[in-house]
Structure formats: C-alpha cells, structure tokens
Image (tube, grey):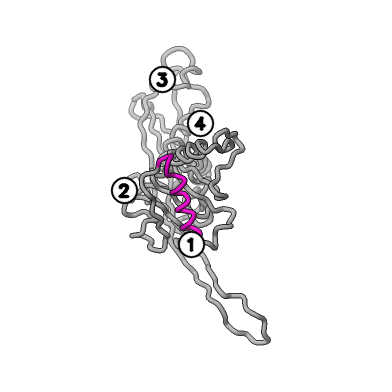
Amino acid sequence: MAFTTTSNFAGKAAGFYISAALKEAKSLDYLTMIENIKFKSNIQRMAGSNLVVDATCDFTDAGTLALTEKVLEPKNLQINIDLCKSTLLDSWEALQMRAGAGAPPPASFDDYVISYMGEIIAQATEESIWEGTAVAGKFNGFLGAATGYLLPGVDATVVQSTASGAYTAANIIANLQTLTADMAANVSAILGKEDLHIYMNNKTYALYISAVSTLGYVNAYNMNGDYEPVFEGYKIAVCPGMADNQLVAAQKSNIYFGTDLLSDATRITIMDMANLDGSDNMRLVARYSAGVQTGVGADIVRQS
C-alpha cells in the first residue's frame, strides 16, 4: 500500500501552529507579542511630566505630554523543504512504522513534521530577535550588527552602558553593578516596574551563577524549578539568542515582537509528491511573518 499524505493549513488554522512554534523561542516570554499585524503597526507610548498641579477654579494648561511613535513591520518569511520519506527510518517515528517497504506512518506523522518545522521556526526566530539583520531569512533584531534597534547609531536615546571587558565569572557582578548604576542614573522612573528585566544569554547567566556560588549564596546555585533568577532585586531574563558580552535592561511592555497569525498568507503545507512526479519525496512549506521593535528607547539600557 502506498503512503500518501497531504495537509494544508492556512490563515487562522495555520496561525495556531505558527503561534505554537514562535512561542518556543524563549525570548518571547519576555517580550510583548502583537499577533495580528496585517502590514505594519504603529507603537505609541505617552510620557508626561508636571501634569498634576494645585486645583483652582480656572482651567490652566500645565505640564507636558509627549507621544512617541515607532513602526513595527514584520517581515514575510518562508520555509521550503524537500524530505525523502525514507528518512523516516532514521527518526523516532521509525519505531512506530509497520514492517515492510511502503508501509504507512503512524497517524501522528503530520504533527511530527509540523513540530519539526516548528523547531526550525523557533530557532530562527530566537536568533533574529536579538542578532538578526536585514538579510535573507532573517529580520532586523535588537542588537544586530549596524542595524540593531538598541545600537547608538540607530536609536541615540537608548542609554549605553560600558562593560569593563569580556564577561567572566570574576567580573560579571561588577559589570551588572555598572548596569544597575546606569539604570538608577538614567531610567529611575521605571526601576520599580514589575515587568523590568535584565536580559542576558545563557553563557552570561552561567557566569553569574558561578560568581554568586563562589560567594556562597547557596540558593543561587542549588535551584529548583520554582527559582526566579534575580540580581539586586531585578529579574533576570535568560535569552539564548543574545550574543556574548551583552546586557539589556528593559520593561517587557517596552520591547515588542510582531506577527500576523490570521493572514491568508500564513500557511503550513505538507505535500506528497508521489502522485505528482512519482518521487518518494514530500514538500514542506511554512509561511509566516515576524519582526521586533522598541517603544521608548530612553527607557532602555544596553551594556556591551
């Protein structure tokens, strides 16, 4: 019996799978996600000063209210893969296949293939969020070379903090203290915000744990699943896509990830080529959009 399978998901149906794939990117736990951007979205943030004054009988204009606006325009991306069915024999699904050539795979095969594409999407998204540039297959990220949204040449309002050198277990605490001192000096208004995080990659976090464990803070390295990493009261967000020797302090509500999960252009297709060209191949297609943007640059501190 020949093995054939063809699945096609578009629009909202595909959005369900794409959403699950994107959310496997760890950094999205610490970004504000806007899910249904048709073309682009204007991100507006308001900041006021001296707005509250003593009451009088008259109307007297007082204080200032500033509106900042930035554009988040997700980039359209795609995955096109040719997969020979025989590669199933090398996968974990092979254990569930019936004996004999041409035997059909288990009913969960489509879900298995979609999860495979999901891992690709999640990994690519995680990398682009932080280090992506405007090249093929990536979208512009927060720290990408020359074009990153947090770089001084792109947004001069982002506070730049200077590290003493490449991070090590011996200097990471001092560099974190430099960052928090720059936060206190430049973005004091957001220091008590619940969604404020210090963003770092896994390597930097490992250096931090090594440093505090050396100092004898048992709870910092003898951790369980309920442990929430912090530094001097500030939550730590561990983001695998960040490069080494970079720290970012920002509110989750001030850094954004955008996509469109409802668009007809969002799709996942698994197409069996056996009936089309007689081959033993399958074509896997995924189309989606993704992009990032900041809100108020002056409320973000970056260290490098």
Select label 3 or label 2 by which is in front: 2
* Horizontal and vertical percent position of residue 104: 47, 20
**What amino acid is found at the position of numbered circle 1 in the picture?**
Ala
Q: What kind of secondary structure does the magenta stretch mostly adopt?
A: helix
Mark-to-mark CA distance, 2 and 4? 30 Å
**What amino acid is found at the position of numbered circle 4 in the picture?**
Asp
User: Which residues lie in the magenta part?
Assistant: 168-187
Q: Disc 2 or 4, which lies upstream in sequence?
A: 4
Q: Disc 4 or 3, which lies upstream in sequence?
A: 3
**What amino acid is found at the position of numbered circle 3 in the picture?**
Asp
Which is nearer the eye, 45 or 194?
194
Circle 2 is placed at which residue position? 135
Select label 4 or label 1 by which is in front: 1
Mark-to-mark CA distance, 4 and 1? 51 Å
Q: Disc 3 or 2, which lies upstream in sequence?
A: 3
Select label 3 or label 1 by which is in front: 1
Q: Secondary structure at mark 4?
A: helix
Mark-to-mark CA distance, 3 and 2? 33 Å
* Mark 1 closeness class: few <14, some 14–19, many ≥20 residues within 10 Å: few
In the image, which disc is placed on residue 111?
A: 4
* Horizontal and vertical percent position of residue 134: 33, 51
Q: Residue at x 42, y 22 (%)?
A: 88
* Horizontal and vertical percent position of residue 176: 46, 49
Circle 1 is placed at which residue position? 185
Q: Residue at x 34, y 25 (%)?
A: 278
Question: Is 9 left, or right, of 227 in this rendering?
Answer: left
Q: On the image, which quarter does residue 171 sit in?
A: top left
Circle 3 is placed at which residue position? 90
